[in-house]
Amino acid sequence: GPLSLAASWWLPVGERVLADGVALGDLVGSLGHGVLEHLAAVRAARSLPLALAPVPEVDAAPAAAGPSDIVVLHEPLLPQVLRGQIPTFSGISALRAHSAEAVTARLASLVAAWAPVDVVIAISAEPAAIRAAGAAGPAGLALDTSALGGEGWEALAELVEQGVGVWSTSVAHLSEGDADPRPVARAFLDPWRSLGLGVDDLDLVLLPRPGLAECSPSVASATLRQVARVAGELGELIA
């Protein structure tokens, strides 16, 4: 995401991009344009097999709808940006905090630029980050719901009531064997229900915790099987 990129990249003068409002604006604009070009390339590549496929019979069943595009913005440094905890070049001090309104405006500009493509913002489970990212109008927020406290759940509930979806990255990596999926399912469903949120039209995507790509194939396979078991358990608890 633009804020975490700006907090990690350096200007030629020796300071972070985040410290320069003009450079930050340029980064946001460049990211928006570059992703638009990438989305166009993905759509062009996706249409290629259809162009080479045999022409269907006139009375053939209609083709299934194609996949929809989703852009995921990862903002792991958003809490530090909001609190003013990004160190300067010297490390002696920290860059000034960016207001929630300014952060929301930067993210909202990208959500608007990529519309109607859905944008999901991946963040840490901190209330300030949840509110700032959620106010940008994304289709969903990706976060570890098992790390949410009471204030975090309340902030998330407000956004859910506004139509924001939840990508819960709460399934721990499983090294071997099977683990009981019920505690993981209940850790999500119990706070959800305690806030009065409905489950009939629950907009939830269940995912492993970050870092699965660095795991061994056996750990990755076991973890993905656990995700499926937790999803099944959630379905049984909701029914």
Image (tube, rainbow, N blue to C red):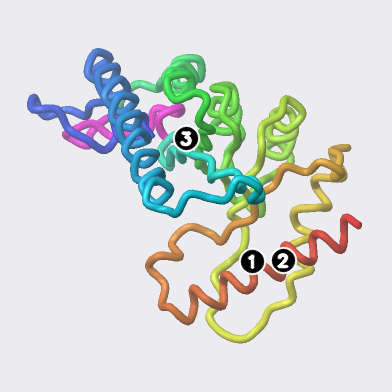
Mark 2 lies on a secondary structure that is helix
- The residue pinned by badge 3 equals 79
Residue in view at x 29 percent, y 17 percent = 25
Mark 3 lies on a secondary structure that is helix
Marks 2/1: CA distance? 5 Å
Image height of 7 relative to 46, above or below: above
Of 46 and 75, nearer the camera is: 46
Left or right of 202: which side holds 26?
left
Q: Are marks 2 and 3 in contact (CB under 8 Å)?
A: no
- The residue pinned by badge 2 equals 230
Instruction: Report the amino acid beneath label 1.
Output: Val
Residue 76 x, y percent position in the rendering: 43, 42
Image height of 179 relative to 233, above or below: below
Q: Are marks 2 and 1 in contact (CB under 8 Å)?
A: yes
Quarter holding residue 34: top left
Q: Nearer the viewer, mark 2 or mark 3?
A: 2
Marks 1/3: CA distance? 28 Å
**Furthest residue in direction left, as rendered:** 12
